[in-house]
Amino acid sequence: MFTRNPSIIFLVGWALLAGGFFLGDTGRIGPDFLWATGIGLIISGFVLFIICFVAWTYRWFFLPVKRREQARFFLELLSLAEESGHSIEQTIIEFSKSGERPLGEQFDRVARHIESGLNLPEALAKVPGYLPAQVVATLKVGHETGGMNMTLPVAQENLREKNQNARGEWVYLVAVMLIAVMIVGILMTYVIPKFKMIYADMLEPGEVMPEFTLLVLKISDTIKNNAAALFILLFLLLGVWFYCKKKGWLDTFWLLIPWRRKRLQRDYSRVLALLLDSGLPEEKAIELAAQSTSNRTIKKRARKVIAGLQSGLGLTEAIKLMDDSREFQWRLTNALQTEGNFVDALSGWHQSLSARADRQHQTFSTLMETTAVLLLGMVVGSIMVGMFLPLIRLMEKLVW
């Protein structure tokens, strides 16, 4: 229960803290029970913050690992059923009734939906989050075309790639950011005000502190006086980000990231080649290949390609409307003009895209990690320099 709504716990914690501080201040000049109640609310607020932190940690780092393993086992089960010639839906139902639980409670929900008469894609749609959206879309394409044996390896590779790149760098970046917020928060709200009081007593009349120190003190006062507003703004921005991501409004933005664009080009063209090789009509193949990417921008472009085909353009010309990348256009038009298997014609390019995307992603991750550490060091170092400048000036006076 706690892992489902940690944001509510966080808001309740803030409410308890605010109420606790208010009653605590009132209790200083009023009845003692108000002060005691305020302390109790403050302690309760901090306890809820700890619970919230544990829930978020489990939800964002440990639960995804568990779900990725369950998804991997699920696709392996589908692959075994396909290889043995058994019905995938019947295999899922029988495995669910066997009493084994490596695939989790959501797998049983999928099995119950299938037993009620739904097919595999429909059942997966009833259990959102069990498999990544792109994997579900790929399985749907395989089910609709009857080519599950072709699309299953694609889905497994997509999942394997997501597992390799899933949140590895984000764990490090989030940890660095949390440490930075804690250190800067303690320095700005507790340490710097202490230095400010000490220097106020030490300075002679008419003497002022260095400008850099005054700047640090001003920033400290601003953060201290507007801490609640800054936290609210931060959570509003995070809320807007996740809402836009959920609605698919960031799909165009993902295409601007080089390694994501390469992977989408690879995934789309690979499924398109499989569908065309299976003899599916061009318009249907373009539509289903776009659906397999679960990217709304790709789907919009696919509709433009289909409109081009309907207006009389050939596939080699219409496919250029899918992506303005010259490499993408040249590779696909060249493969379409080649007699024989489209998958084989594009396989070398797909391997090249995967390798280049992995290198770019790794380079970016390393750069982000290094930048985060450098920024943390610069911020903390600047604060410490600003605080010790008056002390250094005082020591110089004593020496001379």
Image: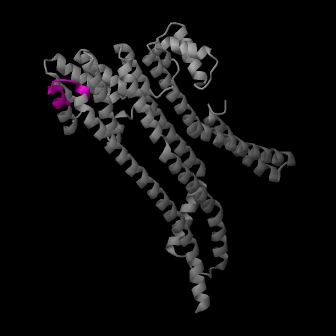
Q: Position of residue 285 (x, y in %)?
A: 27, 19
Magenta-colored stretch includes residue 336: yes
Using the image, determine if residue 181 lies above or below residue 304. below
Image location (x, y in percent) of residue 27: 81, 50
Which image quarter is the C terminus in? bottom right
| Viewer-closest of 181 and 122 | 122
Q: Main secondary structure of the magenta part?
A: helix
Q: Locate residue 204 relative to residue 370 in the image: left or right.
A: right
394 on left or right of 240: right
The residue drawn where x is 60% and y is 79% is 391
Which residue is drawn at the image coordinates 40% and 23% (left, top)?
152
Q: Nearer the viewer, residue 238 or 110?
A: 110
Q: Can residue 285 be seen in the rendering of this structure?
A: yes
Residue at point 29% right, 23% down?
274
Between 286 and 343, the one lying in front of the other is 343
Quadrant where the N terminus sits is: top right
Residue 352 horizontal/vertical position (percent):
28, 41
Q: Quadrant of residue 328?
A: top left
Give the magenta part as a residue range: 332-343
Residue 78 lies, in percent from the top left, at: 47, 20
In the rendered view, tell whether residue 140 sits above or below residue 362.
above
Q: Is residue 339 magenta?
A: yes
- In the image, taking residue 359 as reference, residue 188 lies left or right, namely right
Residue located farthest toward the right when viewing the structure as drawn: 32
User: Which residue appears at 71% of the width and 46% of the height?
Assistant: 46
Give the colouring mode of the picture: one colour
| Farthest-out residue, front | 84
Asked if residue 261 shows in the view, the reply is no
